[in-house]
Amino acid sequence: MSNATLVSTTVNGDPVQFACPTDESLMTALRNRVGLTGVKEGCGTGDCGACTVTVDGSLVCSCLVLGVEAEGREVTTVEGLSQDGELHVLQQKFIDHAALQCGICTPGFLVAAKTLLDRNPNPNETEIRYALAGNLCRCTGYDKIVRAVQDAAKDMRKASKKRR
Amino acid sequence: MGHEQKYVDKKYEVVGTRFNRPDGIDKVTGKARYGADASAPGQLVGRVLRSPHAHASIVKINTSKAEKLPGVKAIITSADLPDVTGGDQGLADILENCMARGRALYDGHAVAAVAAVDEQTAAQALKLIDVKYKKLPHVTDVDEAMCESAPVIHDRIITRGVEPKPTKPSNVAARTQMGHGDIEAGFAEADVVIEKSYKTEQTHQGYIEPHACLASVNPDGTAELWVTTQGHFVFRNVCASLLGLDIAKLKVTSSEIGGGFGGKTHVWVEPVALALSRKANRPVKLVMGRDEVFRATGPTSSTSIDVKMGAKKDGTITAAVAEMRYQGGAFPGNWAMLGCMTAFACYDIKNNQSIGWDVVVNRPKVAAYRAPSAPMAAFAVESTIDELAKEIGIAPIDMRLKNVAREGTLAPYGPTYGPIGIEHTLKAVKDHPHMRAKLKKNQGRGVACGFWFNIGGQTCTDLNISVDGTVNLTLGTVDVGGSRSSMAMIAAEELGIPYEQVRANIADTTSLGHNDMTEGSRGTFSSGMATIFAARDAISVLKQRAAKMWGITEEDVIWENGQALATGDSHSNLPPLSLKEIAAKSGRTGGPIAGHNEVVADGAGMGFASHICDVEVDPETGRSTIVRYTVVQDAGKAINPDYVEGQFQGGATQGIGWALNEEYIYGDDGCLQNAGFLDYRIPVCSDLPFIDTQILEVPNPLHPYGVRGVGETSIVPPLAAVGNAIANATGVRMTHAPMSPPRVLAGIDTLEHAS
């Protein structure tokens, strides 16, 4: 490995260090160096969204970000969605609604859907469809995915009302 | 042990309800391991060098510079994959497709491969391999390839099915003909005759997970392969045959599969990875890039189809003829034959004839894509039926009902239908609220039907009961759409225990007998049947053990609701024994309790569907938007309705993509110009409405639960349903799919100029 650079970053809340070549994508670094294979490669060109993660809260295709750009940032992957052994509501709803078949796109959809609901707790169908338009799914026709997100949003709104 | 395969009507406890899939948690948490997610100690990175030319002689491959690069551990060419196929042309074609042998036959054809210590080194090594090509004339269009003047791709191809046998080689691999009746008499009876020509472009299955595998070959001839596949047993047999390995010594494990749709029924990089590992004597992981997936794997045929149909004024179709040309890429296939078999299968047409031409071109070797060949034939036939209906002045739905195939109809491909569901789906469509939904300006509605076979094939299943009464169901058919859940439900149903008590698992090839691919909508049909029989085997063992525990004869024991009951007056004092109680004592009553079944599952049902599509066409841009879509399909029996709906919706969406956007675009140089998801555009979430579904259940008489395969039929009607909707929205009959904005706009312009 030539031109390796040491990168110090935070992944799913944990401090992480890895060394990677300067031209290596964050996707490859997360998969091969951090061991988070929930980050999927579908195209490597930012077209399919299977490698979607957040960097400092912004939704990105990790194949279009360099590993070295993670320096000092906070990265969240699908592996960071469930907390204390509990599935995130979205994860549970994806299972309950059969919103996944092969499941290869699911990590990217979950990260994208969570980012949407963090910003807009009550999206309408069109808003959901556009928020998820950067993620390709070839199995489901998106029907059950949209329904799962709608149902998760409903539950999350209820839970947040209770908290208040 | 023989088991009764016939359908028995009964009330179900588990089957037909909705359960969550056992692989769900792994897939939503990122734990599920796909083709590219495995690693082995000391593994190398494999990469493939591909031809930049559509057709070229490989004059020389010089690997010496690449070999000297530090970190390069093996470089292979076809010389490292000697032909050991023993005259099997089909296998030899697969071998040549995996690695070019003296000639590159299409843009993207593999010519060499490298294994190196890391990705960077492997990529650098590819650049250092010097290949000297001599370009040859190429042809990528199916009609052009059939011309006398076209460059002949294989000297060995003499057209089959033509009398007298041609003396010269050509690109036409085979001619197929089928049908029945007297065509001329049929057309003579017709009041209206419509004749049209259609074209469909090449599409890709578009699975989001690229092909990926991890191969490890030992010097003693034992080997392991971890791979994303629809059929690891078949991959094992094919790879072993191509590499000269003993079949049982190659252990193949199927990873989670990130979509296949037929494209992962064929080997591409797996023999290459094994050959690299054999040479490097280290494990090799080979993952394709998306551009490689488009250029070198998968696609379905592009076609050119002529259809002529005649009907009486009352709507009766008196004669139908189709002549269909399908390209199979650089190697011959039977794709046109499948088109012929399906073209008129939804209808009872007294006089029908289908002629198919299988053609080779300089494109990647065509692979199965969900109901392979049927969508193109349906596009041509179902569009023509709408034109006939329009000419006669009858509603298209009534035209279809008037001619629909029923039990007893002679199918165009030979058999006489048993109970089938096409008429049920059409009637359901006619009654569906969707048909009464109001259409707005620039909107139109289309209906179309579709047919696809189901196949049975070889299946082998184990069912093992643990001492605590939980059950391992060991399957060999890869789970592509939720079949582990469905199989666990079936086992629970048979045994009379809760779904949660069963864990279904896909075994590797060393742990179970041979299973055919998950293809042809066979997974739930055949594996379901083997699961039923394996469970019934286990029940007979459970009954023996209960008899032993009670000290009575086995004949006096029956199995009901998950427990053994002693029958007869003399045993009325014996309390029932549950599966758990019997399992707990198994060590003392004869050892582990298991059921097993191997079967060639004959009697697969036929799958029929009717779809309704509403489309809005923007007259300024020609862009079509789907505003409503409904799938009605006969499932025979839906084991888990969630996953049946999923198959309906997914197939319909793939068909919609094909209808509106997806196509391989080749330049004059014969190279693929859109080998990526940006330019090969599959439907995204914002392109679509909810896809409504209606499951009908016309039981398949040759499955204990009445199951028919449901995976594929849903991709068959959409091209025509969309085309018919566009025709009704714009007055333009589209005859070229995809019906992309430029094509629709051109159609609108032509219509406006004509009027």
Image (tube, rainbow, N blue to C red):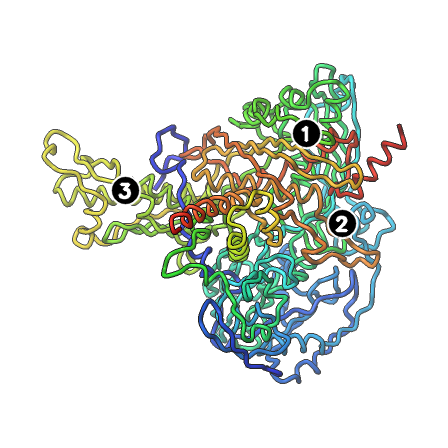
In this rendering, position of residue B511 left or right of residue A55: left
Q: Are marks 3 and 1 on the same chain?
A: yes
Which corner quadrant holds the N terminus of chain B? top left
Q: Quadrant of residue A73?
A: bottom right
The residues tagged by marks 2 and 1 sit, at their Cα atoms, a distance apart of 45 Å
Residue underneath mark 3: B539
The residues tagged by marks 3 and 2 sit, at their Cα atoms, a distance apart of 56 Å
Residue B551 versus residue B85 in the image, above or below: above
- Where is residue B638 shown, x and y percent of the image? 45, 36
Q: Nearer the viewer, residue B516 or A28?
A: A28
* Marked residue chain, label 1: B
Residue underneath mark 2: B158
Q: Are marks 3 and 2 on the same chain?
A: yes
Residue B459 makes an appearance in the image: no
Q: Secondary structure at mark 1?
A: strand
Q: Amino acid at mark 1?
A: Arg
Q: Residue at x 31, y 51 (%)?
A: B464
Q: Secondary structure at mark 3?
A: helix
Which corner quadrant holds the C terminus of chain B? top right
Instruction: Please tell me how crowded label 1 is: few (under 14), some (14-19), or many (20+) other residues with Cα within 10 Å.
Output: many
Q: Amino acid at mark 2?
A: Ile
Q: Residue at x 76, y 17 (%)?
A: B189
Identity of the residue furthest to the front in this view: A164
Residue B179 versus residue B657 in the image, above or below: above
Sequence-earlier tag: 2 or 1: 2
Q: Amino acid at mark 3?
A: Ile
Residue A115 versus residue A150 in the image, above or below: below
